[in-house]
Image: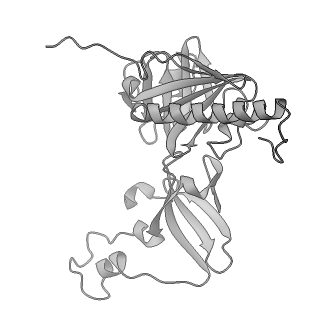
Amino acid sequence: MRLTCPLCGPRDRREFTYYGAEEYLHRPGPDAAPDLSQGGAWDNYLHLRDNPAGPTRDLWYHDQGCAAWLLVSRNTLTHDITGVELVAARKGARDEA
Amino acid sequence: MAELIAKAALDGQGPVTRAGLVLSVLPPAPVWSIAPFPGEDLTPALAALGLDFPAPGRSNRAGDLRLIWTGRDQAFLLGGRPPEGLAAAVTDQSGAWAGFSLSGIGGEAALARLVTPDLRLAAFPVGHVVRTGLNHIPAIILREGETEFHIRVFRSMARSAWAELVEVLEHLAARAAAVQGGASAPARTG
């Protein structure tokens, strides 16, 4: 398996570390209810994940390369990698941190 | 305060020559990390030195100064101090890195045993730089010349990286000797 890093080009999977679902980019805002009640924003952010058969997006870290966080679009049925983008280059990325 | 003595990584280690390649330790030299603050353009400040902030995988030089790309929004200035007042996070990392030189014909064949990216001249011309794993060791590899690579690793891993590289050279030398000696020719080369 290879990921095409937007900065480094195609690289072996061993250079990357998997972090988790794209969900981690969407941290609840300050107005979200501060409890972890079931189905609430924080419960969803921390614990609830889809298990898609098909397209999915998740976060990878290029630790052996450029040290950038990447948002990878892939397909769990076909194992196709359909896109790799820099998290930092996304609109409003700095507000998400 | 006690008198502290600066020592180079692998102090006293002489060059190793095997399979037509020479592996040696680079002398200690300044290494400064320059990471521009978000949205800042360092072009005018660097242009005064004759340098330009490098695109990913590239480097440029002016006299003894060399600016090499080392990561997202980060470059290393080699060979001297950066100017004051850059709109960037600037840190002196001179003591944190150990550098090796691998020179001779076929250096890319030796490195191919340890790194996954294609480092042949056509894909990795002079002045290009790659940040990748040297086996499991994070490394910055610069093509210094057509037959010379500069390999930099965290100083704490210098001894391991040196051992990995020497082992590769010994394997290449052993294979060359086996082929020359007329021993049953190996089915695969390289």
Q: Quadrant of residue B176?
A: top right
**Foreground: B77 or A35?**
B77
- The extreme bottom residue here reads A38
Q: Which percent across, then down, holds residue B6?
A: 32, 15
Q: Quadrant of residue B50?
A: top right
- Please say if B180 is above or below B123: above
Describe residue B152's horizontal placement relative to residue B177 as left or right. left
Q: Which percent across, then down, holds residue B114?
A: 61, 42
- Tally of numbered tags: 0
User: Which residue is depicted at the point 49% across and 50% down?
Assistant: A68
**In which quadrant is the C terminus of chain B drawn?**
top right
User: Which residue is depicted at the point 41% across and 30% down?
Assistant: B155
Q: Quadrant of residue B175?
A: top right
User: Which residue is depicted at the point 63% across and 36% down?
Assistant: B168
- Please say if B155 is above or below A59: above
**In which quadrant is the N terminus of chain B drawn?**
top left
- The extreme left residue here reads B1
Q: Which percent across, then down, holds residue B57?
A: 62, 37
- Please say if B19 is above or below A48: above
Describe residue B187's horizontal placement relative to residue B173 as left or right. right
Report the coloring of the rendering: one colour
**Foreground: B34 or B49?**
B34
Q: Which percent across, then down, holds residue B46?
A: 52, 22
User: Which residue is depicted at the point 58% across and 11% down?
Assistant: B63
Instruction: Work out whether residue B72 can be spotted.
Output: no
**Foreground: A25 or B70?**
B70
Describe residue B150's horizontal placement relative to residue B35 as left or right. right
- Please say if A64 is above or below B3: below
Instruction: Work out whether residue B156 can be spotted.
Output: yes
